[in-house]
Amino acid sequence: MKILSLIVGHDSSACVIKDGNILFFMEEEKLTYLKKDDLPTNLMQEVKKYVDDEVDVFVLTYINFPGLVAPDVFKEYFLEKNNITPKKTIIEIDHHLMHASCAFYSSGFTEALVFVSDGGGRIKGDWESQEFESVFTASYPCEFNLLEKMHRTGWKKWDNNNPIYSMGFAFHMVCDMLGFEWYDSGKVMGLSAYGNNNNNINDFFYKKNNKWFATEYYYKIWLEINYKVKTGLDLKKIKKDLESFQYKADLAYKVQKQSKERSLDRINDIIKKNKIKNFVMTGGYALNCVNNFEYIKAFPNINFYFDPLANDGGTSLGAAKYYWHKLTNDKTRRPLTSLYLGHDC
Ligand SMILES: [Fe+2]
């Protein structure tokens, strides 16, 4: 059985698997050199080398485009234009489940706890809401049991009980404040090494009644910068402070440190509630390799696997693997042994 999977949206990618084995996986940006490229147009030329004209199952997952009409448009645009005829088409928009699938099947574990943490993923039928932390137990052939999900409902109205931003989103907001691109969280992580604890810089997160919340302060700055919404903050002073390199580094230090504290606490809580010793992390926040090392040191009895395809690009691989195991009940483990999954250069 041959499965072709596409993700449309930032980090667009394609994956082809045959009888459970990966034939091809690549992100569009590797062909166009446009970071985070969102339409897998050029990838389809590569895909053609592996699928001939026919695939058994086509899975489309997408993250940027709401509405029911989009899948038909993409199907026509990507498949019919390339003379590819799927016998069966599946639209899959459970974003965190696809992250979890990618990470779990790549890990080689027979069973695992999977912690998905990212900037935010769409929730089916609800364009304004976003999931940003999910916890699953995973086992073969295709058992993913959702234990916890944290998400926000609504977008433009702050509610202390409905934390609007995630750890990943906090990094995005700092990117905005520092004048970086939206997806330059890695730069913030690197910059944090030059920072110090600065009590004049506001907190991002706090814990109350055993639950994590986000502070409104940075959300206001984000609204001011991106939507010109007047929130009463002295944005001129904030911008003045940010002219100093040390202040920028201290801000990066703050978000790195606070998200470390929060994620360590979350992992500790997840581990305490479950007996499984295999722990898989995925979603964009799992690309924070500095904090990943902290988890290994803090929990020496846990077997960690950090998904190397933790960005959204990995979800096409997750979707292909998910439907292979779901449709065939195959329990064969095929751990990811290489990231060289694209075409020969
Ligand atoms: Fe994601």
Image (spheres, rainbow, N blue to C red):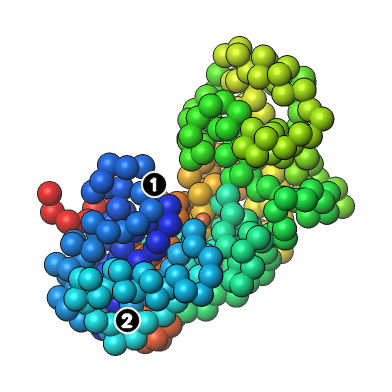
> For residue 42, which quarter of the picture?
bottom left
- Any atom of ligand 1 within 8 Å of the CB at mark 2? no
**Residue identified by numbered label 1:** 36
Q: Is residue 338 left or right of residue 293?
A: left
Q: What whole-number distance in Å separates the C-alpha atoms at marks 1 and 2?
A: 26 Å
Mark 1, Cα crowd under 10 Å, few <14 / some 14-19 / many 20+, is some
Vertical position of residue 127 compared to residue 305: above or below: below
Residue at the spot x=57%, y=32% of the render?
176
- Any atom of ligand 1 within 8 Å of the CB at mark 1? no
- What's the residue type where badge 2 is placed? Val
**Residue identified by numbered label 2:** 57
Q: Nearer the viewer, residue 197 or 240?
A: 240
Residue at the spot x=44%, y=76% of the render?
91
Residue farthest along the right direction in this orientation: 209
Vertical position of residue 249 compared to residue 144: above or below: above
Task: Tell me the SS state at disc 1.
Answer: loop
Mark 1 and mark 2 lie on one chain; the one further toward the N terminus is 1
Query: Where residue 29 sits: x, y (%)?
Result: 31, 47
Task: Tell me the SS state at disc 2.
Answer: strand
Query: Where residue 332 sits: x, y (%)?
Result: 35, 77
Query: Where residue 281 sits: x, y (%)?
Result: 52, 55
- What's the residue type where badge 1 is placed? Lys
Residue at the spot x=51%, y=75% of the render?
68
Q: Nearer the viewer, residue 211 or 156?
A: 156
Mark 2, Cα crowd under 10 Å, few <14 / some 14-19 / many 20+, is many
**CB-based contact (under 8 Å), mark 1 and mark 2:** no
Residue at the spot x=79%, y=48% of the render?
158
Q: Nearer the viewer, residue 11 or 134?
A: 11
Query: Where residue 260 sits: x, y (%)?
Result: 64, 39
